């Protein structure tokens, strides 16, 4: 029998019709995740053509992108950024009611960012194919699921057929050897890999993250890493399930229980690349060489270690230096920070909030800094508040918000002012991503918190050492 990769196994088990004559394959979809921004057009398409959904029970919806992160008013109303964002929310509520889709709306204790709440519910499971009208659907690959971000037209196609048209990607292995040093996070690793691979290095590929350093990551950390695979140009990211995956899923609402769970667990543990499987490309990463890392330019591949200097100026990076107002070959540490954002589907889970709180406890953020902390779901918000993390953030001078995508893309009105520098735990640092003229440095929650306290880009290991002392 030919040795095959995990991707190949998932692809073949869901392939309804293979690629041929330049036409894409037809892939069956196990789970379709929906939010308010990319779904209105898709539901309208069904309505216009008189179509019903193929399998409503395989679709799960939430409100996240356009939702205000400020608390509801006394009258129960919400302060939307504009009429368009409010209309998106109302449209999803109406569409889900009309087509019989389960929606985790404002009244649900499980509402949250789509790529946070679905795993929490156990809706994301190893071996699945998952799609969502959102680029960072790759997050779910942390569970050994093949997860693609799709466009609005494709959302309509999946609603109607429960299938996706897709050209078969190539495979890439990112082998991360050794162990991450103390004080180095999964976000630092993700940014480091993005710097090594580049924003186009994974184009046309599905990346499987492998090696000792990957096995040592928690599920939350694995989600952070797979979330960022799309920023390497990849179609999706994957990590083979193991005992960590199984135990994280045990007892969640949408997974089986008892003997059925144990049987599922045995099946999940068999989902791995064969030892002799060959990848189209392999990249080797030494985990021990990774340091706290931030972006400096206008794409996630322009990265620098927190204690290093920026690159020399070239024709290729001139625009990035101009937009970011940074000096070539200067240190990144010490650059003035105006806003800090902890949140997004990349870094809004309970471990991320704990990392930030550990460095903020007993301290105040710099007087000129505004800091927003936005939990990824209602469940995480409750857990953080039960641990007193909200009190730590407030005491430090940060704003504790309601769950949502928030400043990751600023669709809900959470944006910075032109020219301001934001240290953000999100996933994209394109020009204007967090507001017109806003400059974004992507970072880990620990780096974000340290920078908020210092008022400049700061190495979290220095602040952590002071805590330990």
Image (cartoon, helix red, strand yellow):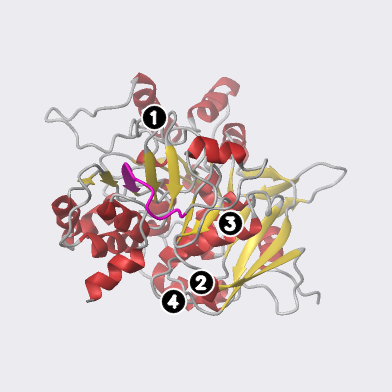
CA distance separating discs 4 and 2 = 9 Å
Q: Is residue 461 magenta?
A: no
Of tags 4 and 2, the one toward the viewer is 2
Along the line of sight, which residue is nearer the eye, 466 or 272?
Answer: 466
C-beta proximity under 8 Å, tags 4 and 2? no
* Residue hosting label 4: 259
Q: Which mark is residue 194?
A: 3
The answer to which of marks 3 and 1 sits earlier in the sequence is: 3
Chain-order first, disc 4 or disc 2: 4
Comparing 68 with 105, the one in front is 68
Residue 134 visible in the current orientation: yes
Cα separation between marks 3 and 1: 27 Å
In three-dimensional space, the C-alpha distance between marks 1 and 4, rounded to whole angstroms, equals 57 Å
- How far apart in space, not on screen, are marks 3 and 2 (Cα)? 33 Å
Q: Secondary structure at mark 3?
A: helix
Residue under label 1:
418
Would you name the residue on which mark 2 appears?
264
Total marks drawn?
Answer: 4
Q: From the viewer's perspective, is the residue at label 3 or at label 2 nearer?
A: 3
Which of these two is toward me, 123 or 413?
Answer: 413
Residue 205 image point, x, y percent: 70, 55
Q: Please report whichever mark, 3 or 2, sits nearer to the chain's N-terminal start.
A: 3
Mark nearer the viewer, 3 or 4? 3
Which secondary structure type mostly characterizes the magenta part of the structure?
A: loop
User: Compared to 444, does 212 lie above or below?
Assistant: below
Above/below status of 385 relative to 256: above
Contact check, label 3 and label 2, Cβ < 8 Å: no
Which image quarter: residue 303?
Answer: bottom right
Helix, strand or loop status at disc 1: loop
Range covered by the magenta-colored residues: 331-341
Name the side, left or right, on which 158 lies relative to 326.
right
């Amino acid at each position: 029998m030919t040795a095959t990769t995990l991707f190949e196994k998932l692809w073949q088990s869901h392939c309804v019709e293979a690629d041929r004559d330049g036409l894409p394959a037809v892939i069956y979809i196990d789970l379709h995740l929906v939010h308010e921004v990319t779904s209105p057009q898709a539901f309208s398409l069904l309505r216009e053509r008189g179509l019903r959904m193929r399998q409503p029970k395989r679709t799960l919806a939430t409100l996240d992108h356009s939702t205000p992160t400020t608390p509801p008013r006394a009258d129960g109303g919400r302060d939307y950024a504009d009429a368009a964002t409010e209309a998106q929310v109302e449209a999803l509520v109406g569409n889900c009611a009309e087509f019989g889709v389960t929606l985790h709306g404002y009244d649900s204790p499980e509402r949250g960012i789509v790529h946070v709440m679905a795993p929490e519910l156990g809706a994301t499971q190893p071996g699945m194919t998952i799609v969502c009208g959102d680029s960072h659907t790759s997050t779910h690959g942390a569970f050994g699921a093949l997860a693609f971000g799709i466009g609005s037209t494709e959302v309509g196609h999946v609603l109607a057929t429960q299938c996706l048209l897709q050209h078969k990607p190539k495979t890439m292995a990112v082998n991360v050897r050794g162990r991450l040093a103390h004080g180095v996070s999964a976000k630092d690793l993700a940014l480091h890999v993005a710097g090594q691979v580049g924003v186009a290095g994974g184009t046309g590929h599905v990346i499987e993250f492998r090696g000792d350093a990957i096995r040592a990551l928690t599920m939350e950390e694995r989600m952070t890493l797979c979330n960022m695979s799309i920023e390497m140009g990849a179609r999706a990211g994957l990590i083979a399930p193991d005992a960590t995956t199984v135990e994280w899923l045990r007892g969640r609402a949408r997974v089986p229980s008892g003997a059925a769970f144990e049987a599922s667990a045995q099946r999940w543990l068999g989902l791995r690349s064969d030892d002799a499987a060959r990848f189209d490309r392999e990249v080797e990463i030494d985990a021990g060489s990774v340091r706290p890392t931030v972006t400096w330019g206008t794409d996630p591949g322009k990265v620098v270690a927190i204690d290093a200097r920026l690159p020399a100026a070239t024709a290729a990076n001139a625009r990035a230096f101009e937009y970011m107002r940074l000096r070539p070959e200067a240190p990144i540490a010490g650059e003035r920070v105006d806003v800090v954002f902890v949140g997004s589907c990349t870094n809004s889970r309970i471990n991320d909030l704990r990392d930030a709180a550990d460095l903020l406890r007993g301290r105040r953020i710099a007087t000129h800094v505004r800091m927003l902390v936005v939990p990824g779901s209602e469940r995480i918000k409750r857990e953080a508040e039960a641990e007193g993390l909200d009190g730590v953030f407030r005491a430090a001078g940060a704003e504790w918000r309601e769950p949502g995508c928030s400043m990751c893309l600023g669709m809900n009105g959470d944006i910075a002012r032109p020219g301001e520098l934001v240290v953000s735990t999100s996933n994209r640092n394109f020009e204007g991503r967090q507001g017109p003229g806003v400059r974004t440095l992507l970072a880990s929650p620990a780096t974000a918190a340290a920078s908020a306290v210092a008022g400049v880009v700061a190495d979290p290991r220095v602040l952590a050492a002071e805590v330990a002392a």
